[in-house]
Image (cartoon, grey):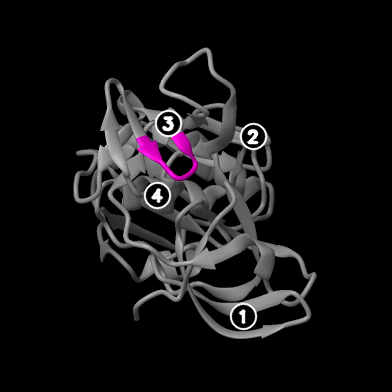
C-alpha cells in the first residue's frame, strides 16, 4: 500500500494504544499508512513491515519519494555545505531522505546538507547482515528500540536485514516464520530463537544480540549463551533459521 505520510523526526515510537507503551520505533523518512487520526494520535501501519500501532500526529508529514538512505550509524544535516556550520537534525542509521541537489561533498535535502559519505542511494544495500549488526556493537539496549541510541533483539535483526534488502518483521515471533528453517552445524548468518528473544550468528561459535542481561548489544559464545538462558529459566532454543 502506498504510504500517506512519513516520519518527520529522527525517531518516533509506535505504541500499542494512544499514549501507550513503545512496541517499536520508526525512523526519519519511514513511510506510514494513516488509517485514523484522533486526539493527536495517528493509527496505521509502517510500509516497510506492516507494523501496526499509534504514532504521534505531530511526527508525521505528507509522504514523498526518497533517493537516499543513511548508511553510517548516524549523521547530521548541516545548515550549509560545511562541517563547521550548525547541525539541524540528527539522523540514525537507515533514515530516508530526498535529494534536492548535489553540492560538492554534500547532498542537499530539505533537512539540510548531509555528507555524501554517510548516504547510499535507494536500491543499494549492504552485502552482509552480520556486517550491519556489528556496527551496533555496544549500543544500549532499549525495548522496542531501532537505532544506535537504543535497540532491542528483534530491532537489531530487522535493521540488519532491511539494510541488506531482506524483508523482515519487527518482532521476534513473526521473524521465526520469515526465513528458512535450518539445523546442523552453526554457520554465519543464522538466527537463533528463544521465547521472546533472537540472536544472529557471526561465525560457527559466536553470536551477536541486543540483550537485557548486558543492557547492550554484545558478542557471546553460542553454546554458552544457550546454556545460560536455559539455566536462567528462559527455556531452550525453539527455532533456527538462515538469512
Q: Which residue is denoted by mark 2 in the rendering?
A: 140
Q: Position of residue 113 (x, y in %)?
A: 42, 31
The correct choice, above or below, for 39 with respect to 110 in the image is below
Sequence-wise first label, 1 or 4: 1
- Residue 232 in sight: yes
Going 67% across and 43% down the picture, which residue do you hit?
212
Marks 2 and 3, Cα distance to the nearest angstrom?
Answer: 28 Å
Contact check, label 1 and label 3, Cβ < 8 Å:
no
Q: Dot 1, how many residues are within 10 Å of its Cα: few (below 14), some (14-19), or many (20+)?
A: many
Q: Position of residue 202 (x, y in %)?
A: 33, 34
- Residue 187 in sight: no
Q: Which residue is denoted by mark 3 in the rendering?
A: 113
Going 48% across and 62% down the picture, which residue do you hit?
170
Q: Give the structural element (helix, strand or loop) at label 4.
A: strand
Marks 2 and 4, Cα distance to the nearest angstrom?
Answer: 23 Å
The correct choice, above or below, for 67 with respect to 84 in the image is below
Quadrant where the image shows the N terminus: bottom left
Residues in magenta, as a range: 108-112
**Which label was assigned to residue 32?**
none
Amino acid at each position: 500500500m502506498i504510504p500517506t505520510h512519513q516520519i518527520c523526526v529522527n525517531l518516533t515510537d509506535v505504541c500499542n494504544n494512544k499514549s501507550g507503551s513503545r512496541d517499536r520505533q520508526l525512523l526519519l523518512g519511514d513511510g506510514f499508512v494513516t488509517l485514523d487520526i484522533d486526539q493527536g494520535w495517528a493509527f496505521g501501519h509502517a510500509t516497510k513491515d506492516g507494523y501496526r500501532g499509534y504514532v504521534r500526529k505531530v511526527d508525521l508529514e505528507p509522504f514523498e519519494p526518497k533517493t537516499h538512505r543513511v548508511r553510517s550509524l548516524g549523521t547530521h544535516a548541516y545548515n550549509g555545505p560545511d562541517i563547521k556550520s550548525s547541525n539541524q537534525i540528527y539522523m540514525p542509521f537507515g533514515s530516508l531522505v530526498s535529494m534536492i541537489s548535489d553540492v560538492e561533498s554534500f547532498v542537499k535535502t530539505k533537512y539540510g546538507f548531509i555528507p555524501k559519505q554517510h548516504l547510499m542511494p535507494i536500491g543499494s544495500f549492504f552485502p552482509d547482515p552480520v556486517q550491519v549488526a556489528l556496527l551496533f556493537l555496544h549500543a544500549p539496549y532499549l525495548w522496542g528500540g531501532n537505532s544506535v541510541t537504543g535497540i532491542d533483539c528483534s530491532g537489531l535483526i530487522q535493521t540488519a536485514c532491511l539494510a541488506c534488502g531482506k524483508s523482515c518483521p519487527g518482532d521476534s515471533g513473526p521473524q521465526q516464520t520469515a526465513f528458512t528453517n535450518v539445523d546442523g552445524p552453526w554457520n554465519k548468518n543464522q538466527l537463533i530463537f528463544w521465547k521472546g528473544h533472537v540472536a544472529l550468528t557471526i561465525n560457527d561459535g559466536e553470536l551477536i544480540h541486543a540483550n537485557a542481561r548486558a543492557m547492550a548489544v554484545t558478542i557471546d559464545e553460542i553454546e554458552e549463551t544457550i546454556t545460560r538462558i536455559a539455566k536462567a529459566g528462559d527455556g531452550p532454543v525453539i527455532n533456527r533459521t538462515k538469512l
